[in-house]
């Protein structure tokens, strides 16, 4: 935990030097209890930015290839990431995310599953809604607005919690999960 806190404090300091950081709505991130931080994804720096500004430790899923490089693998593992084999499907990753949330921890993920530069709220993966509903967790939408150019603005807009409590304990099919995930992505883009 010390490694995480020290690293995030360092990244917060570095990002504030490198960019004109503007954070709006940080009070919407609860300090306790299970929660999913859900953001658009434009750069490999996004998880580090979210961890640096978050008032609590975040856990992530990351593609397994990132863990193959020793230094990077060590860094992201100690920053709360766990590997996902995208070729074999994400059922084990979904189970791991639910396990994290069931411990009342915070989990961060990107609904599109990969970096996307164009606004498109129709390409969300169904996993985010499935994780939120099965773990009974609220979702905090965040829009990251930046091109990550030195000394340019990096704005994070954090929205109010989204809850799908009307779907808890209901049988839901993949299409419904996909539709709900697209609603989450729309909420993220609406923060722009």
Image (cartoon, rainbow, N blue to C red):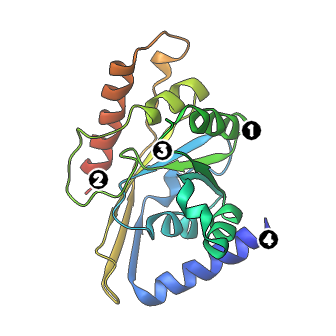
Q: Quadrant of residue 145?
A: bottom left
Q: How many marks?
A: 4
Q: Which residue is mark 3?
A: 86
Q: CA distance from mark 4 to mark 1?
A: 19 Å
Residue at point 34% right, 90% down?
A: 151
Q: Is residue 23 above or below residue 153?
A: above
Find residue 27 and report its horizontal and vertical position in percent.
52, 56
2 or 4: mark nearer the eye: 4
Dot placed on the residue nearer the N-terminal end, 1 or 3: 3
Residue position for label 2: 191
Q: Closer to the observer: label 4 or label 3?
A: 3
**In the structure shown, which secondary structural element does the residue marked by tag 3 occupy?**
loop
Label 1 CA crowd tier, 10 Å (few <14, some 14–19, many 20+)? few
Gap between marks 2 and 3, in whole Å?
29 Å
Q: Position of residue 91 (x, y in %)?
A: 56, 31
* Residue at the (42%, 45%) spot, across then down: 160
Tell whether 189 sits left or right of 170: left
- Mark sitting earlier along the chain (1/2): 1
Q: 149 and 143: which one is in front?
A: 149
Q: Which quadrant of the figure has residue 182? A: top left
Gap between marks 1 and 3 measured at Cα? 25 Å
Crowd rating for badge 2 (residues with CA inside 10 Å; few <14, some 14–19, many 20+) = some
Q: Quadrant of the N terminus?
A: bottom right
Point out the tag, 2 or 3, that comes first from the N-terminus.
3
Q: Where is residue 70 drawn, in percent x and y?
A: 67, 72
Quarter location, residue 158? bottom left
Q: Which residue in the structure is indicated by mark 1? A: 103
Q: Which mark is residue 2?
A: 4
């Amino acid at each position: 935990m010390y490694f995480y806190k020290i690293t995030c404090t360092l990244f917060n300091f570095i990002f504030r030097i490198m960019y004109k950081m503007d954070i709006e709505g940080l009070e919407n991130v609860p300090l306790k209890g299970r929660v999913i931080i859900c953001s658009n994804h434009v750069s490999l720096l996004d998880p580090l930015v979210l961890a640096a500004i978050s008032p609590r430790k975040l856990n992530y899923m990351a593609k397994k290839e990132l863990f193959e490089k020793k230094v990077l693998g060590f860094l992201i593992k100690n920053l709360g990431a766990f590997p996902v084999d995208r070729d074999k499907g994400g059922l084990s990753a979904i189970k791991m995310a639910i396990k994290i949330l069931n411990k009342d921890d915070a989990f961060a993920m990107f609904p599109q599953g990969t970096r996307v530069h164009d606004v498109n709220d129709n390409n969300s993966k169904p996993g985010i809604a499935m994780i939120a509903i099965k773990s009974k967790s609220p979702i905090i939408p965040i829009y990251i607005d930046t091109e990550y150019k030195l000394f340019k603005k990096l704005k994070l807009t954090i929205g109010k919690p989204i809850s799908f409590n009307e779907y808890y304990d209901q049988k839901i099919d993949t299409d419904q999960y996909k539709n709900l995930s697209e609603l989450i992505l729309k909420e993220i883009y609406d923060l722009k």
